[in-house]
Image (cartoon, rainbow, N blue to C red):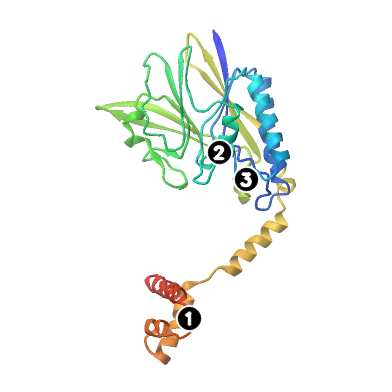
Amino acid sequence: MEIARIGIDGDLHLSSKNRGAHNDYPQESLMYLNYATDIFEKNGCTHIVNLGDIEYGRFGTLEYRGLVEQAFKRRRELTKGHFYIVKGNHDSATYGMTEYEFYLGKGAFKGSSDLDIGKTKLFMCDFGGEDREFPIDSGKTNIVLGHNYFMFKDTLMPNFGDPIVLDERENFFGVDYIFSGHIHQEYVFSGIIARGGIGHKCIVHQLPCLARPEYLGDRTPEKGAVIVLRVYDDKEPEAVRLEFPLLPIEQSFNLALKNKQDEDSARKHVDVSSVVKGLAEFEREIGDTESYIKGLVGVKAEYKEKALELLKAGEEE
């Protein structure tokens, strides 16, 4: 018998400031949060778990903070308090309180928790907490809900930074599924996690970022996706992937502005090799370039050091 439905969505990346070439990123990112909540409500979700990175820095207005609070309140009331958010890398800071910590302190949602529901165990894992132990129950389906870049050694996908290589993580042995945020793009793949000469298959689903924070050309997604996990007391859970439309590309992004930003960036790019070539010509005229830079009169030491760093970098290319 089905006893729970768990809505799972990826990075929210809400922001009160416009980003990149968006026409109105603050409202668009908030709209997608509410879209996902609509899907969870329509599908009768009893729990909601967001996979982290609710923000792109602190919100700049009280009005926007209030709108986010109302959106979170709706999720909390819909699930009778069973609304959780995994802590992502953008949800931590070395300089005071983040929006995640602000809303968590107000009770807008619950932080990462482990849930044992029917034939399913769920382990929520904050960013950076992947060394934790997972109390696996071999008689149930064991699922990790995390926020990181997971892969296996033979996984074919782009480089998204420093990965959690599951082949090397014995503490994940026995985990059947991983649903994760962090890399903003959607990938599904599987591999084997071994311990003591025994292998266990694990399926990984990296969920997309709801907010589509960047224009990626032909790779810019046109649809969003969430998961509704149907949990039973007598069999394995079923993960149902549900799509929803995103705004048309031309409505979401100011493409003329994007092209101008790309052109400006290209003009600012410095070809170090051409600089070094010029210095080489100069060196034939005045002698050793490094000695010349060090001997410049009226130039601050830190500027000389930077010039020497650039010279050395260019010579090593």
Q: Quadrant of residue 290?
A: bottom left
Residue type, numbered disc 3:
Pro
> Which kind of residue does numbered mark 2 sit on?
Asp
Residue 121 horizontal side relative to residue 72, left or right: left
Q: Residue 304: x and y, percent? A: 44, 77
Q: CA distance from mark 3 to mark 2?
A: 12 Å
Label 2 or label 1, whichever comes before in sequence order: 2
Q: Residue furthest front?
A: 96
Q: Would you say 56 lies left or right of 235 here?
A: right
Structural crowding at the residue carrying mark 1, measured as other residues with C-alpha within 10 Å and reported as few (<14), some (14–19) or many (≥20): few
Total count of labels: 3
* Residue 218 in picture, x, y percent from top left: 62, 49
Check contact, mark 3 vs mark 2: CB within 8 A.
no
Q: Which mark is residue 63?
A: none
Side of 172 where 57 appears, left or right: right
Whole-percent x and y of residue 259?
67, 59
Q: Which residue is mark 1?
A: 299
User: Disc 1 or 3, which lies upstream in sequence?
Assistant: 3
Q: Nearer the viewer, mark 2 or mark 1?
A: 1
At 40% from the left and 28% from the top, the residue drawn is 202
Quadrant showing the C terminus: bottom left
Q: In the figure, residue 60 lies in which quadrant?
A: top right
Question: Of residues 180 and 303, which is closer to you in this image?
Answer: 303
Q: Which element is circle 1 on?
A: loop
Q: Position of residue 4 (x, y in %)?
A: 56, 14
Crowding near the residue tagged with mark 3, few <14, some 14–19, many ≥20 C-alpha atoms within 10 Å: many
The residue mark sitting in front, 1 or 3, is 1
Residue linked to disc 2? 53
Q: Residue 213: which disc?
A: 3
Residue at horizontal 59%, vertical 47%? 219
Front in this rendered view, residue 23 or 157: 23
